[in-house]
Image (cartoon, grey):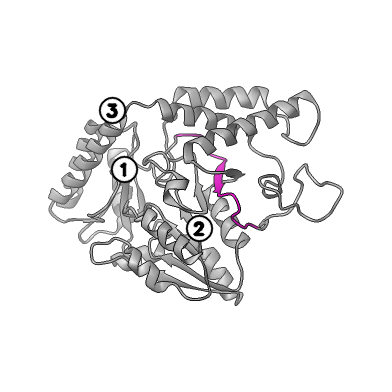
Amino acid sequence: MIYFDNAATTLHKPDCVLRANAYALKNLCANAGRGSHSASAKAAGILYEARKSVRAYIGCDEVIFTFNCTDALNTVIFGTARRGHVVTTAYEHNSVLRPLEELSKRGMISYTVVEPDMHGVIDPKAIERAIRPDTYLIAVNHVSNVTGTVAPVTQIGNIARRYGILYLLDGAQSVGYMDVNMREIGCDYICFSPHKGLHATQGIGCLCVKNGAPLKPFKFGGTGTASHTVEQPFDIPEGFECGTLPVNAAYALIAAVSYKKRQPLSATRDLAACGEALRSGLEKINGVRLYGKYNTIPSIACFNIEGMNASLVGDILNEQYDVAVRCGLHCAPLCHRYLGTMGTGAVRASLSYCNTEKEVEFFLKAVAEIAGH
């Protein structure tokens, strides 16, 4: 199989990640922070080291472990909610849009969706124009999971800081593929899933928090702390990590971050070359329309074949060519409304550091054959 669905989750994991995960499943099965015995203490030590690893990599102050990026985003959106206004963009994933819509239905907030400009890029000035006196949060997708378009996150951070507004960044598609530093960007929260760009295992998400950024618990349950009371503690991270944590995924995350730090520059150059070959090749095929031409990362290419539903194209690629892509609306309805693809969906081919130019060549030939019918 040629696997081009890495924006959903990376298929190939480094050997060190696989070994770490296997070791932890066999040897680190105790519940961290829920006992004083040595096995529980060892598991707690792994979580501590995993937090330290993420803090150093992202440049953040605190790390809360969640189930995934969606869980992390929900934790911030509900954990900062108050009566007022939120600014977001048309590129957002439903893990941002649906919580905002739910809060809106409850009559608690209103929100403004900023559309991309004529080049398909989010204009920081448009973000600023959307701000109202009661705006308390700006929520922005760093990289669109549909088109791969990169938002001007540092400029938006300057705006948020100037107005004293909390700033949430969805880093699901950027962390691991771009240099992402929380302090440089100037955001209060970054959420990401290590099983994407970091090639870690599924089952854990990261919510990175700036010191002093407000956050109320979104979930309630056992934390291993303040067990004398039925009230949920507000401590970060314990008050936000109810129940048993995936120690094996945290241990594998340590290995993934370490591997990423050691990754040679040639891997980034190779991915960029594959991405450029993919995008330029798609543009040359008659009947193919490529979306997102400006400010994009090399790992994501989104397109349609004229006269064909995206799901049909995906089925043909899977069944006749053994190529895995993502087709449909990609859990980002406002983006597809902007692109005009609500009726057809779109085909997304997403690369990782493990893909090769030969795979891209094969894929382009397959798309050309499908487009030529």
Kindly identify which residue carries mark 3.
266
- Report crowding for label 1: few under 14, some 14 to 19, many 20 or more residues within 10 A (C-alpha): many
Camera-nearest residue between 18 and 229: 229
Secondary-structure class at tag 2: helix
Per the rendering, the mark at residue 26 is none
Q: Is residue 319 above or below residue 166?
A: above
Dividing the picture into quadrants, the one containing residue 366 is top left
In screen coordinates, is 238 left or right of 36? left
| Quadrant placement of the N terminus | top left
In screen coordinates, is 132 left or right of 368? right
Kindly identify which residue carries mark 1.
299
Q: Is residue 343 above or below residue 320?
A: below
Count of marks placed on residues: 3
Kindly identify which residue carries mark 2.
95
Dividing the picture into quadrants, the one containing residue 261 is top left
In screen coordinates, is 47 left or right of 143? right
Q: Give percent across and percent down for residue 367.
A: 21, 46
Q: Give percent across and percent down for residue 110.
A: 52, 75
Q: Amino acid at mark 2?
A: Ser
Q: Amino acid at mark 1?
A: Ser
In screen coordinates, is 125 left or right of 305? right
**First reached walking from the N terminus: tag 1 or tag 3:** 3
